[in-house]
Amino acid sequence: MRKIALNILTQTEQKDAYLNLVFEEALKNVNLSSLDVGFVKELVFGVFRNKILLDYIIRKNSSIRLKKIDPKILNILRCGAYQLLFMDKVPNHAAVDESVKLAKKCSSPKTTSYVNGVLRGIIRTCENGVDLKDIKDETEKLSVKYSYPKPLAEFFVKDFGNDAERLMAAGNKTPELCVRVNTLKTTKEEFKEKLDELDITYRDTPYTDCGLYLFGATTEKRKGLEGLFTVQDQSSQLAALSLSPEPDSLVLDLCAAPGGKTTHLAELMKNQGKIIATDIYETRLKSVAALAEKLGISIIETKVQDASIVDPNLVSKADYILADVPCSGLGIIRRKPDIKYKENITDFTELNEIQQKILDAAYHYLKQGGIMVYSTCTVNKGENIEMINNFLKTHPDMALDKIKSPHITGDVVKNEGYLEIFPHIHNSDGFFVCRIKKQENV
């Protein structure tokens, strides 16, 4: 298991790849129990969530500068340090011994002795927790404590002030498994009965009536629920619920892959009408079609299309549009911790240009009286409310439209036409969802 984790970490860094994709690919051809998969996932994602802190601790206990350490050995040290500091169920001796065994397979006896020494040093120096007293700058201390590169820590402090630490801490928590019930095939109550039969415990999502948090839902148990649910965070569920398209409508879902929101729209439409799901990559659209088939949905048509370029065949055709645009992803760091380490993560210039172009294209597709929802999975104002305010200034016939879906519960909608979800406030992915209407005769 630890060797698999090491390979995932090394490949992700060497190829500058997406951690979740490397993780999924690595587990395709190995036969692990749900318990073992959980161990590998916690180790891999835990190291990424805490990489800067782990490196700080390793540096304190190492006679060699981090840049001089072989990347694979450094990842062995990170895995060992993470087990020592964060995985209570792993005894210290097992964390050290297994790390030494891995190092022995990868390098010389001298290196294994070094790994053993560093990890035993960490046990001694961190017996009473990690000491960050030597870091005087408060923002740098946050950067190390929660493993956010300093520019990103500075960005959060600037935008969120005293709430920045809570937001960063929430981004380091492991999210619970959240699903959306497929109302085309079952009801929420019937689904709960099946969960009871499978000995899967659950909790209702506080802001959506179609969501549940599941506990103990192993891969084996989930097979008995095939086609009855979709894994989707409640924040993501709010996008389709805010649009709430009527049956027999024409809906455009721009940037649709992998299809979670697309299929949700179809469920809300009772599988009546038509949804044109577009994406720039044909391979990604295959996942939309596969998910639709699995859920018993027949009204989705996939189409390869750059959402930032106007398709003249669709001008003034759409009753509803979902524009779930490419974004910085700063709201889903808890789900994709490698986002933190992207180069120039706080430079939003290129993203803003793409988002603006997609909004402009969507405007041309919308009928008079039509509704559009703009959504992102970021907490950056420049990609969210500021983007919408600028759009409304240049499109006087567009106006915020009150979000009033009966499927949205709780007090999450506090504004007339948009809602903001924050991990540290709502215990959910960070999302922005805005509903806009094209006015008639303006």
Image (cartoon, helix red, strand yellow):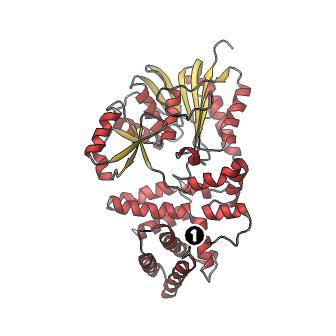
Residue 225 horizontal side relative to residue 153, left or right: left
Where is mark 1, residue-wise?
54
Question: Residue 315 appears at what percent x and percent y?
Answer: 59, 22
Q: Residue at x 37, y 45 (%)?
A: 202
- In the picture, the quarter occupied by the C terminus is top right
- In the picture, the quarter occupied by the N terminus is bottom left
Classify mark 1: helix, strand or loop. Answer: helix
**Which sits in the foreground, 410 or 415?**
410
Question: Residue 391 appears at what percent x and percent y?
Answer: 70, 30
Q: Is residue 340 visible?
A: yes
As drawn, 323 above or below 87: above
Q: Quadrant of residue 266?
A: top left
Q: Residue at x 48, y 63 (%)?
A: 44
**Which sits in the foreground, 406 or 65?**
406
**Which sits in the foreground, 15 or 339?**
339
Q: Name the outermost residue toward the front.
A: 128
User: How would you rate the neighbour count of disc 1 (Cα within 10 Å): few for under 14, some for 14-19, many for 20 or more?
Assistant: many
Q: Is residue 347 visible?
A: no
Question: Residue 275 appears at what percent x and percent y?
Answer: 46, 27
Residue 286 horizontal side relative to residue 189, left or right: right
Tell me which amino acid carries mark 1.
Answer: Leu
Instruction: Count how many numbered circles sit on residues in the image.
Output: 1
Q: Name the outermost residue toward the left.
A: 197
Question: Residue 400 appears at what percent x and percent y?
Answer: 64, 25
As drawn, 183 above or below 221: above
As drawn, 305 above or below 368: below
Q: Quadrant of residue 365?
A: top right
